[in-house]
Amino acid sequence: MKIHKIILLLPILILLNCSQDDSSTIKFTHIYDPLAGPQGKMNVDWIDQRVQIFRQKFPGFSVELEQAKWDQIDTKSMSDFRAGIRHDVLLTSPQILPKHALVGDLLDLSPFLSWTPKKIVEFSWSPVWQACVYNGEILGVPMGAHTRLCIYNKEMFRQAGLDPEKPPQNLEELISAAQKLTRDINGDGKTDIWGLGIYFGPSRATIELAFAPILWHFGGKLWDEKTKRAVFSSAAGIKTINFLRDLIYKYRVTPPWVLSGAYDDIVLRGFLNEKFAIAWGWGSYWIQPLEQKGWLKNCFPPHPDAEMTRAGIFLTPTNPKAQFTNAWTISVHSLSKKPEISVELLKEFVEPQALKNFPDAGLPGTLSNWQEPDFQSDFYRIWFQAIKFGRSMPRTAHYEELASAIAAALQEILVKNADPEKTLKKFQRAYNIRYAGE
Amino acid sequence: MKKQILERILIKILYFFFFLFVIFPFLWGFRTSLAERFETALIPTRFTLMHYKILFARPEFLIYLKNSAVISLLTIFATLIIALLSGYALARLKFSGQKLSGLLLILPLLPPVAILVPLVSYFQKLGLYNSIGAIVVANVVFNLPLSVWMMRNFIRGCPVALEEAALIDGCSRISALFRIIVPAVGPGIVAVAVFVFINTWNNFLYAFALTSSQSLRVLPQGILSFLGNWGTYWGGLTAAGILVMIPPVIFFLIFQKWFIAGIFGQQLK
Amino acid sequence: MIKNKHQEQAQAYAMLSPMLLLLAIFLISPMVTGLIMSLYKTSLSGITTFVGLRNFKLLLTEERFLTNLRLTIIYVIGNISISLPLAYVLAMLITKKLRGATLLRGIFLLPWVVAPIVSTVLFRSLVDPAFGPLSLLLEKISGKQIVMLADPFWAMGTIIFHSVWRSLPFMALFLASGMTMIPRETYEAARVDGAGRWKQFTSITFPLTRIHLIIILLTISLWTMQDAETIYAMTEGGPGYSTEVIAVRMFKESFINFNLNNGAAMGILLLLLGATFMFIYTRISEKD
């Protein structure tokens, strides 16, 4: 009969193994796996440090780290909210905050933060803050500034007979420079250096970094805030598509392989491996690799004597000079049993001096950092402008669906050579049937 | 005679072709795990253990390893006991509703992805969410139908005589099962254990959906995180892939004979 | 005797109960919850309304979902039509007595032993446009640079190739186990009658392993159909929606887009699709 007992014990054993939901444990959900290469490790190390400091201040509380994938953390927060699963502090994406606002899984921080107007200015200067405030509620605090601009290889400019200190100012100049820069070096009939690297792969990045900035240039919009409908298939939308398509098929300054893979694999690797003379959508989180490669001097970590030796940067040469600008934001879950303490932990993470060292900040999101001498170089002044020109994505609660609909339309047009107008209209209709009016 | 030699050569070539087909991705992964970052030559000029070292720079890899091991062992243990009991009942006992046992083979029709969302709130209500127990239960449940079915077939295949002698001697069903059947179907049990181990060790979905704590992550989740926000770190990814592969491959190669005999039939042993 | 019978019955139920309990709680009832969910619509703010079959109607009239469905069928049939003939060849090789065959048999099963996630990333690096040997080979053959995962045809091709690689060894071993059950004399008799290799295959091997064929077809079809993680890790369903099978779409709806009701409806449709395959296979096996 011993066996009987073992079998009966088994479920009990498993149940004992269960985690106790202890409210003196503050749960912090982030997206960094220390295994995912050196960058992942740096971020987790930074988090550990902040948690240490928090625990010294609040010895009665412990912090449990939780982890989700970067493109799933927002949904996890929402579906866990529905299932009654508690989180306390978590990273969120500003693009998804409108959806969070409807679901109600994030706490309005305004009664808790009790920040002076001066303190609020620290954050509110950046476009990311605008995305954090929804119907007067503060749903998140930016942890940095991820913006994008264009980068170019000065050596290649010189070789093509272009002035390495005069990057293109508008789209016409960009194309004519890119045409001069596109070259077959070894004479085997294949292009070795492409004038312009820009990403059109199957992810959100395509609409954020390529489609939207050019659509803004032509005066278009992705989504209309008043009617709450997708409007990307406007005349401006078609112009945008034609512009992007021409880069590959008419001007031949962009290789067809930008249609696949990850944004980083294409833009970051392409530029560092000298496949691109100019790269569009260069992220503020990619300054370190340039310094490592020796193409920048004293730029990372920032220093007043920063110098752009081999690589140069310029603002996106569209008319509003706007690039998509976001950051990771940090929020408090509304099922938190200890909102006050959770907000204290949140504050620990958004301390300006701490954020300065946050590896995934991209650039500082806090104004006081920008006034330090380290950030007064030409290099960082251009980045600062880029942030100020930056824009957010439309405030639709169905942002991911909008982004994937446009990315899919683009892919169909660029890969399968579908008719631009019909395809855009088709995808817009499919989106509006489901989500128009929210 | 000539024709036979020709045939032998053809067979060898075919064997070699299949061998290459199966093994090439592994060789490539092994190569990438030893090559320097951004190396593009088919056979790199310099080899490095850097990517393996990075994996152990922080304790997480070992934590994931431990979790995967604990979950796999608990799952095997629980599945085997339940499968033995049910398999025995299906193979040896008569009861009404026995004909419904074929339903076991229909259960795998249910796509796991489809039930995960309701499952999350079930586990939350049971207080099991975000625990090793949750992952173990999910793995046991999804492995059960096939394991029970296999166990039933093994028990059917072993002679009834011994067991009847024991029953007449006053042995209970349960002790007959554990004293007589278990030793007799040893290879079958090993086959089921290896089958369950491979499924559990490789599984990503249940841990992904049923836990959120960093301290409860399993290896496949770690692997997926390499395809991360900063582009793919191929060196580390393949190094981790190779390491994760080792336990099931070793298990499998050790128990290969029994496993193949158990799953595919004695003749192939 | 009658008492014994009752006792046996009670014993049987007692022994079956742990399994039945687990399956009922954690497999059947979530499925029922899923079914119920698929009949409701939940607004983002959490208001749930009964909508009957509207979710299904919306899906079945949506172009994207019809593409998902078509791609699922292409994925399953593509995988099977390539791996099945190869599996027969490999199975016949395996059943030949050859030196070192045991070890090779073990090696042949390795693709099934490694985690799907691991093999997916291995294949992704094989077709990497910058350094993957398969894309370089393709470039040599075709003379132009093809980014395999950016091209709808090649992306699906890569996915099918990967799944052939994973399922072929298992299929072959399963078929081989069927073949070893055919007595040698059957072949000898056929040879005496002057039957050639092909004739032996069509008149003996194939019909006598038919039950194995049906089981393995069903197993592999279900695995392929329910596979979301490898395609998601390989292409995320792109380029465009050109590799987005139902399972991937369902994963996206449930875990990324937070359209849980829609995801549940897709789960039900996927289940029905699986049942359809099962029905077709059993019909084939019952024929003549």
Image (spheres, helix red, strand yellow):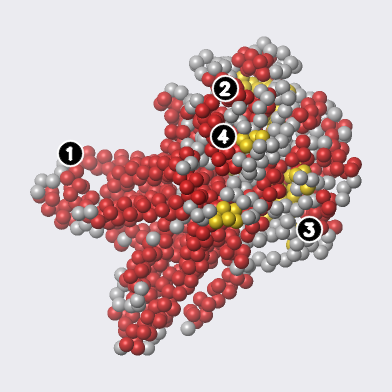
- Name which of mark 4 and mark 3 comes first in the sequence: 3
For the residues labelled 2 and 4, the Cα–Cα distance comes to 17 Å
Three-letter amino acid code of the residue under disc 4:
Gln
- Mark 4 vs mark 1: in front: 4
Q: A243 and B175: which one is in front?
A: A243
Residue A207 position in % (x across, y down):
62, 33
| Mark 1 nearby-residue class (10 Å; few <14, some 14–19, many ≥20) | few
Mark 3, residue position: A339
For the residues labelled 4 and 3, the Cα–Cα distance comes to 41 Å
Q: Is residue B86 visible?
A: yes
The kind of secondary structure element at disc 2 is: helix
Three-letter amino acid code of the residue under disc 2:
Asn
The kind of secondary structure element at disc 3 is: helix
Three-letter amino acid code of the residue under disc 3:
Pro
Q: Are marks 2 and 4 on the same chain?
A: yes
- Mark 4 vs mark 3: in front: 4
Residue A73 position in % (x across, y down):
65, 49
Three-letter amino acid code of the residue under disc 1:
Lys
Pointer 2 with pointer 4, Cβ within 8 A: no
Mark 2, residue position: A242
Q: A350 and C262: which one is in front?
A: C262
Residue that sits furthest to the left in the current view: C193
Q: Is residue A126 left or right of residue C92?
A: right
Pointer 3 with pointer 1, Cβ within 8 A: no
- Mark 1 vs mark 2: in front: 2
Q: Quadrant of the C terminus of chain C?
A: bottom left
